[in-house]
Structure formats: structure tokens, C-alpha cells
Image (tube, coloured by chain):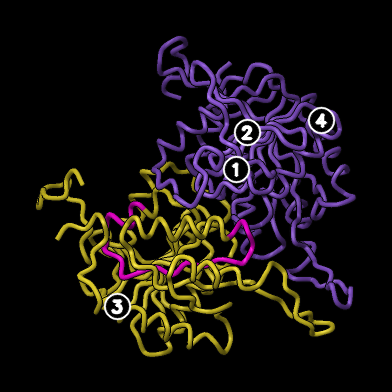
Chain colours: A yellow, B purple
Amino acid sequence: MAHGHQHGSPQQQGPFPLPGVSNIIAIGSGKGGVGKTTVAVNLAVALAKMGYKTGLLDADIYGPNVPLMMNTNQQPRVLTENLIEPLQNFGVKVISVGLLNPGDKPLVWRGPMLHSIIRQFLQQVVWGELDYLVVDLPPGTGDVVISLFQTVPLTGAVVVSTPSDVSLQDGRKAIEMFRTARVDVLGLVENMSHFVCPHCHQEIDIFSKGGVERTAREFAVPFLGTSPHAKSLYDFAKQVIMRVAEVKSSAPGGNILQVQ
Amino acid sequence: MAHGHQHGSPQQQGPFPLPGVSNIIAIGSGKGGVGKTTVAVNLAVALAKMGYKTGLLDADIYGPNVPLMMNTNQQPRVLTENLIEPLQNFGVKVISVGLLNPGDKPLVWRGPMLHSIIRQFLQQVVWGELDYLVVDLPPGTGDVVISLFQTVPLTGAVVVSTPSDVSLQDGRKAIEMFRTARVDVLGLVENMSHFVCPHCHQEIDIFSKGGVERTAREFAVPFLGTSPHAKSLYDFAKQVIMRVAEVKSSAPGGNILQVQ
């Protein structure tokens, strides 16, 4: 990075660890509408219920759906020095642009504004001590993810996909993006793999179940399971924790743009 | 716009009509994964089958799924003066970043690169004479849509949503965005409103059917129907054509950033 070594200058960029935050885990997908936010919310709540100090950062600026799913809808308090106090529900600290800009007015913003808000959400929110900060990424491989990579070192990423062709097509791009940025892919999650008819209770294979597991094998990354809801939720969270431990013990790590 | 009146200068921006292209229709959604590309592809193919000269521009740079759905996968030919020849299938001329960058490597690009490619897809692709150019937008309200608004005047936009809360939340933002840019909303389409069980053939109300129609009433925009597949496809295309005629006859029009 151009300014990576200008420590102390205003152009100083990072990535630098967030003080007090042990692990930052991104939930990505490539494609929208595959259940990324559902997985992020469920993972964060499961981690909190297991006793870990957990935060959830909604990085989807144009479609911030975390507040609706987390049932948080107050305006966050702004403290002195422009620090923002996150909301809290289900034991999880939450920040989202949907809290700061509620209602139907869209934020029609170009990339540099996205960069500013992501830095602000990381550095000016009073996260305090966290074992896990879960980041719900927007679809795509653009400004938000680049800014995230450049601002903080990530512990790893979970990639969510449905087994449909189009979802897998974009999911593979997400895996490649994390690899290029040297972010460990903790694993793949298959969402909407099947559906049980409420009338006849037979299983309906909406897309073609198993496609995500095959993709995981193809890319040699762990498969974390299908639709981590209901009873499998804690298993899912435990697998993520185990994978984080593996990743941290195995390699010196460091994302591609990390300055150490 | 800052440079709007510097005609002839290199900074000259637009929006300016595309020579030979009668109507440009954007298909947007706010949220990803709601069937936007499916609607865009079906509309384009229906228009072509009805005898209209039709093009389809895939503006989803990070998740270009149009080639998969249109079954187009060759590299487009680059002619002299950097002009690009679109591919053609089902009678529709097609361009997509997925044709220029096939495979799993993601384009990890910030906003200015998106701006360049959108302008290039509009101005350097040999569209020829078109009755309709259908633009499949990416999710969100960022660089791609801003660049589109600034480059060409749009005839109107179709907004796609599922009846789920989160999809409607983002769909309302998309309507507001088009309104702010003075782009006529031709209507709303409800996708995935219900599902018929292949085993017992009963109808399953996955989300809550009717939510998009209610939203259309709330915003006083036409409701174009549910899941425009199969036999309703031509009806859908006809409705869009009718709405385009209404919009063009009713007002002087012009998008917010248009220079005339």
C-alpha cells in the first residue's frame, strides 16, 4: 500500500487490529438473497448465548437488513468525540446504517462514502472488549470489502451460498476474493438446500441439494453444513470457533494488505 | 452536475440519449437474489419474440449471471476503435462483464472502475438500432446506478421484490431512488410469491403473498403481477410496453441529471 509505512501521518491506512477485539469474522456470499444476513445474525446470537462477547457489524450499506432481523430500531447514541454507542439485543452489540438512516430513503452513495462509513463503524463505534466481531458483508466484491481488508486484519470468512448455479457461480468468486486477500475461508454454508412442504411434509429439493458441499471439496475448504438454523445452530457456531482456533494456531497469517 | 454545461470538453458528462436506442429500461430491486436477473432476461426475450429489436446489458459487475441464464459464453469480438460486438441469443443482443471475464476470478474493483465499465457498455458496444435496451442492475443504490443515471436518460424502471419483509424494505428504497432521480417507475413485480409442491400440488405461501401489491398501492405505482414466467410472460412484456407508451406521452420527462 502506498501509505502503509507512513506511521503517524494522517494518510496512515492499516490494516491495524481493533484494540480489544480478538476476532473479526466476515460473512460473505458474492450473491445477494442467499441467506448471508440470516447466517450472520444466527452466528452472532449463538456466540453470545455461548458466553462470548459478540458484536455484529452490518456492512451492507444499501440494503441494511440486520436491524429488522435483530429487532433493533432505536437511533444509536452519539457520545463525545463522535464515538457511537452500538445498540444491544439478544446479548449482541449491533451497528447498522439502517439504525442511523431508518425509513425508505436510500443512501445513493459512491464508493468513497462507503469507505468512510466502514472505517467509522470499525473505529468509532464503542465495541469495547469483544471475543468475536461478526461482519455481514454486502453482495459483491467492491468498495466495502476492499475497505474492510485495508482497515482491519480479518480472522477469517464464512461463505454462504444456495446450491443454485447462479449462487454457486458468485460464491466461487467470493472464495477467490478472500484467497486473493489472504483471508482464511473458515468454511462454506449451504442455505435453502431444501424445503419441507407444510401440507404433505415431503422434502422438496428446490435447487439441487449438495452443490455447496461439492464446491467446498473442489476448493478444499471445510463444509460447515446446511441451513444453520434451529437445532444445528450451536453446532455451526462451534465449528466456526474450532476453525478460528485452527487458523490462528496454524500460520503467522496476515491479510494481503496488512502492515506489521 | 459540475461539468454538465461544458459541451465539447473532455469532462462532458451527459446524460445523452444513445443514438439508435429508443427506450432504456432498468430492472432493479434493492436486494439481491429476488429474481431481478430472471425478470430482466424474460422481459428481453419476450420483447424480442414480439418482434422488437432488443438488447440486454448486464450491469451487475460483481455477480454477472446473465450469460449463464442467456446461455451465452463466447468472448465478444473487439472491433476497431475499441468497439465491442455484443453476443446474440434468443434474438437478444447481450453484453456482460461475465463474457469479458469468465471463470471464478472476481473483479475486486472500487467505484471508479464500475463507472468506466458502465459507460463502456453503453457507449462502446455496437448495439445498433434497438427498440428496447433492458439493463439488469446490481443490488444496491451505488456507483453503477449513479453512473447509469448520469450517462443515459432512462425511459423507466421495473422494481422486482419478493413479498418478504427484508426484500420489501430494500425494494422501497429502490423505488425512492428512482423517484429521486426522476426515473419513472413502470411498475412492481412480485417474484417467489408462492410455490406449488411437486408432491401434493398444493400451493405454499413461502413469504406472505400480496406484500408487493400492497407496496405498489402505497407508493401509487402500477403492480405488474407475480412471477412473470410461463404463460404470463407476454402479458408482462405487453404491460411494460403499454406503461412505456404512457410515460412517454404524459410528461416532458428527463432524469434529474439530464442536460438538454
The reply to whether discs 2 and 3 touch (Cβ–Cβ < 8 Å) is no
Q: Are marks 4 and 1 on the same chain?
A: yes
* Chain letter belonging to callout 4: B
Vertical order, B68 against A67 (above or below): above
* Disc 1 residue type (three-letter): Leu
Q: Mark 2 = which residue?
A: B182
**For the magenta stretch, what is the residue range?**
A146-167
Q: Residues within 10 Å of mark 1 (few under 14, many from 20)?
A: many
The tag earlier along the polypeptide, 2 or 1, is 1
The reply to whether discs 4 and 2 touch (Cβ–Cβ < 8 Å) is no
The tag earlier along the polypeptide, 4 or 1, is 1
Q: Are marks 2 and 1 on the same chain?
A: yes
* Chain letter belonging to callout 2: B
The reply to whether discs 4 and 3 touch (Cβ–Cβ < 8 Å) is no
Q: Mark 4 = which residue?
A: B246
Per the model, the C-alpha gap separating discs 4 and 3 is: 56 Å
Which disc is residue B137 wearing? 1
Which image quarter holds the C terminus of chain B? top right
* Chain letter belonging to callout 1: B
In the rendered image, residue B227 lying in the magenta stretch gets the answer: no
Comparing marks 2 and 1, which lies closer to the viewer?
A: 1
Per the model, the C-alpha gap separating discs 2 and 3 is: 45 Å
Q: Residues within 10 Å of mark 3 (few under 14, many from 20)?
A: some
Q: Mark 3 = which residue?
A: A130
> As drawn, is A104 to the left or to the right of A77?
right
Q: Are marks 4 and 3 on the same chain?
A: no
Per the model, the C-alpha gap separating discs 4 and 1 is: 23 Å
